[in-house]
Image (cartoon, rainbow, N blue to C red):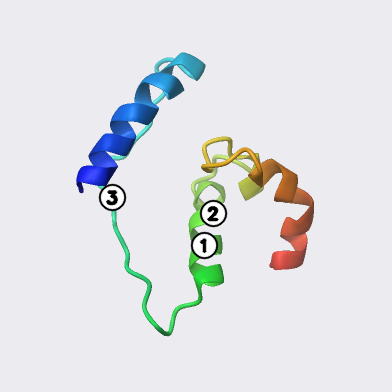
Amino acid sequence: MEFIRLFKGRVTPRARKTEPGRKLWQRSFYDHALRKEESVYQVTMYTWENPVRAGLVEEPYEYKWSGSDVWSELGEYYGHWR
């Protein structure tokens, strides 16, 4: 919980400069420990596709808050991952 608080505290001012007035965080979050039977790949893809399910973008790599600038570079490979 402390990590999330610190992370949000550092990211919020920077993000607000980019998109003033935009709501950045939901009220709570769901942390998840990976179980033995779960694939890291499947859990990662599920998380990466959240903005698509929310109707924010057409493809996950289009969402600029995905956590890394390299995601856009991976867009061409995304179709091969599904």
Across and down, in percent, residue 48 comes to 54, 54
- What label does residue 44 carry, if any? 1
Please tell me how crowded label 1 is: few (under 14), some (14-19), or many (20+) other residues with Cα within 10 Å: few
Q: Secondary structure at mark 3?
A: loop
**Labels 2 and 3: the sequence-earlier one:** 3
| Residue 43 screen position, x and y as percent | 48, 67
Give the residue type at disc 3. Answer: Phe
| Residue type marked 1 | Thr
Callout 2 amino acid: Trp
Q: Which residue is mark 2?
A: 48
Contact between marks 2 and 1 (CB within 8 A): the answer is yes
> Residue 2: which disc?
none
Note whether residue 57 is visible: yes
Residue 14's x, y, as percent?
43, 21
Alpha carbons under labels 2 and 3: distance apart: 15 Å
* Residue drawn 77% across the image and 65% down it: 80
Residue at coordinates 32% horizontally, 68% vertically from top-left? 33
Q: Which residue is mark 3?
A: 29
Give how far apart the Cα atoms at labels 1 and 3 are: 16 Å
Above or below residue 61? Residue 17 is above
Name above or below for residue 23 compared with residue 55. above
Mark 2 Cα within 10 Å, few/some/many (few <14, many 20+)? some
Q: How many marks?
A: 3
Dot 2 lies on which element? helix
Please tell me which of labels 1 and 3 falls first in the chain: 3
Q: Secondary structure at mark 1?
A: helix
Alpha carbons under labels 2 and 1: distance apart: 6 Å
Above or below, 32 against 30 in this view is below
Residue sitting at 34 percent across and 28 percent down?
A: 10
Asked if residue 46 lies left or right of residue 21, the reply is: right
